[in-house]
Amino acid sequence: MSEETNKEMSFLEHLEVLRWHLVRSFGSVFVFAILAFVFKGFVFDTIILAPSSPEFFTNRLLCELADKLNMPLLCINQMPLNLQNIKMSGQFTTHIWVSFVAGIVVAFPYIFFEFWRFIRPALYQNEINNSRGAIFFASTLFSIGILFAYYIICPLSVHFLGTYQVSDQVENIVNLGSYISTITSIVLAGGIIFELPIFIYFLAKVGLVTSSFLIKYRKHSIVVALLLAAIITPPDVISQLLVCFPLIILYESGILIAKRLEKKKNQTSTLAKA
């Protein structure tokens, strides 16, 4: 194990160390949440409300593609949503909630760094060496998931849910809180789901899953991917497939990661026997 574990720590000492890691993590979220609260114009007008605007990057790109392919259905979100607030404190509580979520998203790399610092003393030196770059890859995958959900899934979800009607006599006037919860849940779900290779890495590292196990249940994983896609996207086929395909790719990446770990373990055991 690393030098930091040369001295045995009691259970209470471990709890004290964990407490300070949590304090620093929550502190980073709090700092970024305050910044998001202060710059509400940028957070709401430029980021949160943007997917519903005709000027949003994805909306403009799809409309240009619709013109070239002569497929009008591809052009989405050309009529801005009619958002309303029906509670006295609705906008203020929404402002606080969005600031908190923004704090978590921006502080995620540091939160993962604190988690890594907590488990690092329990690892052997070779495990530490093999895990180098974990923070970078976890943060990168989380960011890619956030961007994928924001630029691909959010505009499609806003268009489908915002324009869907059971009757022409019913007008869609969306509540602000409903819109915000939809956007934030999709974005956070995207970031978490893209962490799948990291989860598989740690599970394979401790021996809870193997590449053969993952291959055996590959068909089951496709069903789970379809279910997850159905949960975090509106009930239209295009959005569900756009989420399902990356999930399958991430799962296959996890299989390759598990195989690589097993190969290293076999090489290490062979050298030890020699």
Image (tube, helix red, strand yellow):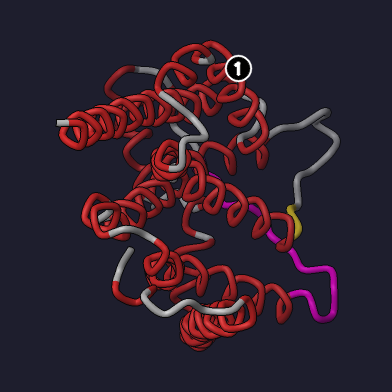
220 sits to left or right of 24: right
Give percent across and percent down for residue 86: 84, 68
Q: Which residue lies furthest to the front in this view?
A: 274
Q: Which residue lies at the image location 71% right of the left edge and 33% below the top edge?
A: 164
Q: Which residue lies at the image location 27% right of the left edge and 22% below the top edge?
A: 68
Determine which quarter of the picture holds residue 248: top left
Considering the whole magenta stretch, tell me its main secondary structure: loop
**Residue 212, relative to residue 231: is it above or below?**
above
Give percent across and percent down for residue 258: 35, 30
Q: How many labels does the image show?
A: 1
Q: Which residue lies at the image location 37% right of the left edge and 25% below the top edge?
A: 255
69 sits to left or right of 160: left
**Residue 102, relative to residue 216: is it above or below?**
below
Span colored in magenta: 77-90
Residue 78 lies in magenta, yes or no?
Answer: yes
Which element carries disc 1, helix, strand or loop? helix
Give percent across and percent down for residue 27: 52, 86
Residue 255 lies in magenta, yes or no?
Answer: no
Residue beneath label 1, please? 223
Q: Looking at the figure, which quarter contains the N terminus?
A: bottom left
- Near-viewer residue (77 or 48): 48
Res 101 visible: yes
126 sits to left or right of 205: left
- Near-viewer residue (76 or 161): 161
Give percent across and percent down for residue 34: 52, 87
Res 36 visible: no
Residue type beneath disc 1: Val
Q: Which residue lies at the image location 82% right of the left edge and 28% below the top edge?
A: 166
Q: Looking at the figure, which quarter contains the C terminus?
A: top left
Determine which quarter of the picture holds residue 47: bottom left
